[in-house]
Image: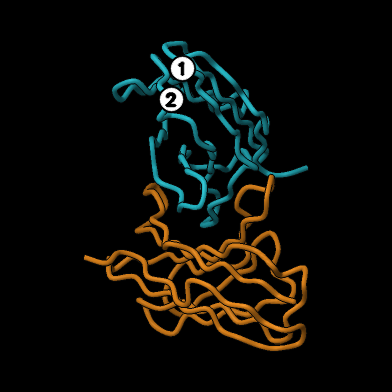
Amino acid sequence: QKEVEQNSGPLSVPEGAIASLNCTYSDRGSQSFFWYRQYSGKSPELIMFIYSNGDKEDGRFTAQLNKASQYVSLLIRDSQPSDSATYLCAVKVWGKLIFGQGTELSVKP
Amino acid sequence: NAGVTQTPKFQVLKTGQSMTLQCAQDMNHNSMYWYRQDPGMGLRLIYYSASEGTTDKGEVPNGYNVSRLNKREFSLRLESAAPSQTSVYFCASSEGTRTEAFFGQGTRLTVV
């Protein structure tokens, strides 16, 4: 079992809809949680980070963390075609930064 | 401000050849990481260095060695390249436990 798991997708949503991306992790010692976006052929870039249980909002993005369920999610409101990319969940645990396999999101005009 | 710089950007090796991928960061970060990325596999951690002078294995260390030369530089060495090591390699750095990692532009390596 991978330490960080995501649905690989692809996830397809219409423009203007809410995209919901999910991630689970196995190590209860995990300390911080990140969502990265990666366009094809490019490096990952940070979208959001979250450390505490609950929700954290930044513009159209909301990250949710539930440590009891070992679950972190990313909601993208008013999805745009420019949001089409691979979204990577990452967890920092004991000095390591471990990534999930990524979820490919496609936003259709 | 260059951030994280990787060299080379592209490389083709023959099976059995050796090479070193270079990574340098100018953000005074303590932690540095090497990842490989294959289609559908996300980023898999090869080795990481939590601070200058320390290195630890990640998820897929076999066939690789690393050197944390100083606080700025973290190199990845393939002693005897194999076709299975064909991949895109990313170097990253971060300040500490609660901070995000910044990535280099990647090295596309092909082993024939």
At a point 41% along the width and 53% down the height, the residue shown is B101
Vertical comparison of A29 with B13: above or below? above
At a point 71% along the width and 70% down the height, the residue shown is B85
Task: For mark 2, give the secondary structure.
Answer: helix
Residue highlighted by disc 1: A109
At a point 51% along the width and 62% down the height, the residue shown is B90
x, y percent for residue B6: 43, 72
* Apparent colour of chain A: cyan
CB-based contact (under 8 Å), mark 2 and mark 1: yes
- The answer as to whether the residues below labels 2 and 1 share one chain is yes
Q: Nearer the viewer, residue A21 or B32?
A: A21
Residue highlighted by disc 2: A81
Chain for mark 2? A
Q: Callout 2, which amino acid? A: Pro
Task: For mark 1, give the secondary structure.
Answer: loop
* Apparent colour of chain B: orange
Q: How is the image coloured?
A: by chain
Vertical comparison of B43 with B19: above or below? above
